[in-house]
Image: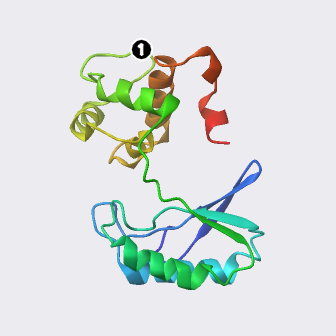
Amino acid sequence: SIAIGKLDYYKARDVLIINFPTKIHFKYPSKIEWIEAGLRQFVSTYRSEGVTSVAFPRLGTSNGGLNWDDVSALMEKFLSPLDIDVYICLDRKGAEGLEKNMVDKYNNTSFAYPIEGVRLTRKQIDVLENSKPINRFWQIKELDGIGITCYKRLFNYCKSETDTHAEQISFDEWFQ
């Protein structure tokens, strides 16, 4: 089960994915001590898990509400001594290219009307309509009641509506 300070490692093709919980429930804020607990575990397990490089988001600062200056100082304290490449994805830029087109399609779509290939419950329709506008496509998967199957359908719908011949890529290839 998911617990603060307990990291789960998953192998997906050539990539190792780390589940790093930053809060107890999506509705509640993160706490700096929870970030520290996860970083401590990462430092003690990365070698045995075979991690040779790692990329982290701004842990706990988006939906968790933590101050980036506090979190970045903590991340630097724990991660800078490591003997691997560490990348911090600041995610300051908005969506670009294909993702921007997909975000625009999402923001301009009324989910109240049936869409071929996208089956939605009444609750999902309400959640999606109330989430607009989004700035990045990944924000959809963070919404309450939107699971991976629904996210994949929305991804494929928005992508198919914006695809150019130069950008033919499937959902599974996008997330390899």
Q: Residue at x 24, y 33 (%)?
A: 129
Given residues 74 and 27, the one toward you in this image is 74
Q: Which colour scheme is used?
A: rainbow
Residue 141 pos. (x, y %): 42, 44
Q: Is residue 103 above or below residue 165?
A: below
| Residue 63 image-quadrant placement | bottom left
Q: Where is residue 51 in the image (x, y as percent from the top left)?
A: 74, 68
Q: Residue at x 69, y 80 (%)?
A: 82
- Residue type at mark 1: give it: Glu
Q: Quadrant of residue 25?
A: bottom left
Residue 173, percent across and down?
67, 34
Of residues 87 and 140, which is closer to you in this image? Answer: 87
Identified at 43% across, 47% down, the residue is 93
Q: How crowded is mark 1: few (under 14 residues within 10 Å), some or many (20 or more)?
A: few
Is residue 38 rendered to the left or right of residue 15?
Answer: left
The image shows residue 136, relative to residue 91, as above or below, that is above
The image shows a total of numbered marks equal to: 1
Q: What secondary structure is marked by label 1?
A: loop
Foreground residue, 97 or 25? 97
Q: Where is residue 68 in the image (x, y as percent from the top left)?
A: 38, 71
Q: In which quarter of the image is the C terminus?
A: top right
Seen in the picture, residue 70 relative to 2 is either above or below; the reply is below
Of the pair 72 and 63, the residue shown nearer to us = 72
User: Residue drawn 33% across and 66% down?
Assistant: 64
Q: Mark 1 points at which residue?
A: 116
Quarter of the figure with residue 111: top left
Question: Is residue 68 found left or right of 128 in the rendered image?
Answer: right
